[in-house]
Image (cartoon, rainbow, N blue to C red):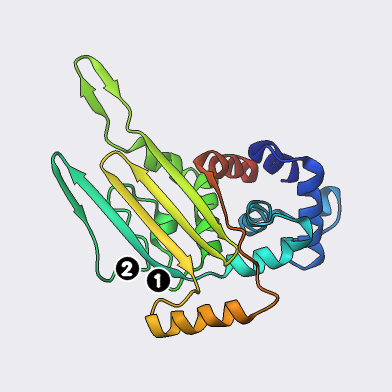
Amino acid sequence: MVKRIAETFGAPEATVTLHDRNLADAGLRTKGGRGRSAAKMSATDVANLLVAVAGSSMVKNAVQTVEDYSGLPSRGGEVSIRNDARSDSNDGNPPSSWGLSAFPIPALQKLPASHSFRDAIVALIEAAADGSLREAVDNLPVEQVGTNRIPNYWGIDVILWGPYPQAAIRIYCKCFSEEHHYSVIPTEMDELMKWSKEMEADRNNHGDLRQIREFSSKTILAMGDLLKS
């Protein structure tokens, strides 16, 4: 797992190893013996290490990063469907559960509205491992141009914002996009103003340095292959 994530992210294997060790010590990664008695790696183990490496600027923050990001609740999604010159999008009160009407991925669609950021990443990894993600991609409509069949382009983006933990997952193909946001930052104005003042008064806050880190379907597919091996 460490080697595959390091290769996929282009990160030093030694750094990913330290992240993994910190998670294991904190009980955030399955531990076991060696050989036949070794613990079987789970999609949750993989998701935790992905979040640690993607969301931590320093190895020492790996455990806190996983705790901060993994439990972020779904705040609802934005769906955009374009047909010819007409574009439809939901607004007002977007649902917290995944619809994916034009790009069905059952593992995600089965998640309850109360699901977390980690739940969604785990579902994507499991879909990549059991073949249902590839099946969903293969079932996307293709465009016929003369004698040529042009495959539908598609992608998955997993995005983490800092210093205040927020995240998003975007799944898209031609003429369709669905994006869900994960955060505990208040949305009501009064609560948001109160929260903002508390953060400004906290001497231990994260400071003013902002970061955006993201990974794509390339990583999701690689992690699925890892679990299959």
Residue nearest the observer in this picture, 200 or 44: 200
Give the residue pinned by disc 2: 95
Residue 126, image x, y percentages = 54, 52
Mark 1 Cα shell of 10 Å, populated few (<14), some (14-19), many (≥20): some
Q: Secondary structure at mark 1?
A: loop
- The quadrant in which residue 28 appears is bottom right
Is residue 178 in view? yes
In this orientation, which residue lies closer to the viewer: 186 or 170?
Answer: 186
In 3D space, how far apart are the residues under numbered discs 2 and 1 (Cα atoms)?
7 Å
Q: Nearer the viewer, residue 66 or 191?
A: 191
Secondary structure at numbered mark 2: loop
Drawn side of residue 228 relative to residue 13, left or right: left
**Disc 1 designates what residue?**
113
Q: From this view, report whether residue 6 is shown above or below residue 182.
A: above
- Name the image quarter holding residue 106: bottom left
- Circle 1: residue type: Ala
Depth check, mark 2 against mark 1: the one in front is 2
Badge 2: few (under 14), some or many (20 or more) residues near its Cα, within 10 Å?
A: some
Q: Residue at x 29, y 56 (%)?
A: 79
Q: Position of residue 81 (x, y in %)?
A: 23, 49
Give the label on residue 174, or none: none
Query: Does residue 31 appear in this view?
Result: no
Q: Could you tell me which quadrant the C terminus lies in? A: top right
- Whether label 2 touches label 1, CB < 8 Å: yes
Q: Position of residue 61 (x, y in %)?
A: 74, 62
Residue 134 position within the rendered picture, expressed as x and y whole percent measured from the top left: 44, 39
Q: Amino acid at mark 2?
A: Pro
Residue pictured at 50% horizontal, 42% vertical: 217
